[in-house]
Amino acid sequence: METYGLIGYPLEHSFSQKYFTEKFNRENIDARYLNFPISSIDQFPELLRKHPYLAGLNVTIPYKQEVMKYLNEIDPVAGETGAVNVIKIHWKKEKPYLKGFNTDIVGFSRSVAPLMKARHKKALILGTGGASKAVAYALRQMGLLYRFVSRYPKHPSQVSYESLTPEIINDYKVIINTTPLGMSPKTDAFPPIPYQGITEEHLAFDLIYNPQTTLFLKKCAENGAVTKNGLEMLHLQAEAAWEIFKQA
């Protein structure tokens, strides 16, 4: 039986195993999908040694960037993005050959595109982790300008949460949360932005899908913003990942 799985830490929040298990059952696919919570990316080589039957892996928080150093090959788009969330595994003489891809770009683009209006020209990306890189790549493809918001800005493209004002928020009509703030089980957390700057002209997108409505989305909706969570993005990127896994 072909085996696929998910690496990240923690994994209690993830719906990926449920999604793929239901897909395999529904489509009569002889495969299984397992969770591999690893508390350090240093455990990745040992994971491969223990499971020499793995055909592919998805990668989630916090390893989308860190895992890249272990890969034999990286798809050009994933390389340009600087993050990987899908690994196709070929076994050659009992050694794994790992190729990395990024399907978050497809998932985010297809999920957010129907909500984009002419007024949506500038975006704030909350967070600077692996998922934020895919979001930035997608926004570039759509022609939007963007700035990253970070607790500890390290680059001219990044600004601090403390520097945000209601006027800045009002100027950036697309706000995307790529951080884990608000994710189950810590659902009382939310990104510290001046929500009074949010209006009915805003689009707020949260990559989190568990819970369905985060405090970030709730606060934005209370000020009239159109909101969407990351569940459809998860499904879309998972289907794109499956297409990669099926490749010979």
Image (cartoon, rainbow, N blue to C red):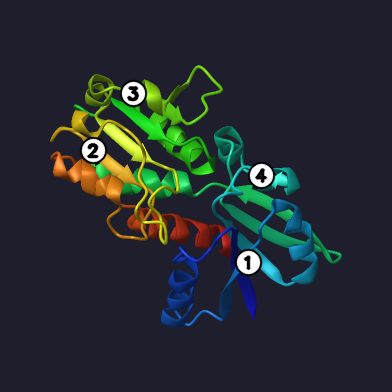
Q: Nearer the viewer, mark 3 or mark 1?
A: 3
Q: Which residue is mark 3?
A: 164
- Please give left or right for residue 195 compared with residue 145 in the image: left
Q: Residue at x 74, y 71 (%)?
A: 51
The quarter holding residue 40 reads bottom right
The label on residue 2 is none
In which quadrant is the N terminus drawn? Answer: bottom right
Measured along the vertical axis of the image, is residue 12 above or below residue 41? below
Q: Secondary structure under badge 3?
A: loop
Residue 242 visible? The answer is yes
Label 3 to label 4: alpha-carbon separation: 29 Å
133 and 26: which is toward the camera: 133
Three-letter code, disc 4 = Glu
Three-letter code, disc 3 = Leu
Q: Which residue is mark 1?
A: 36
Identify the mark nearer the N-term, 2 or 4: 4
Q: Which residue is mark 2?
A: 203
Measured along the vertical axis of the image, is residue 18 above or below residue 114? below
Q: Secondary structure under badge 2?
A: strand
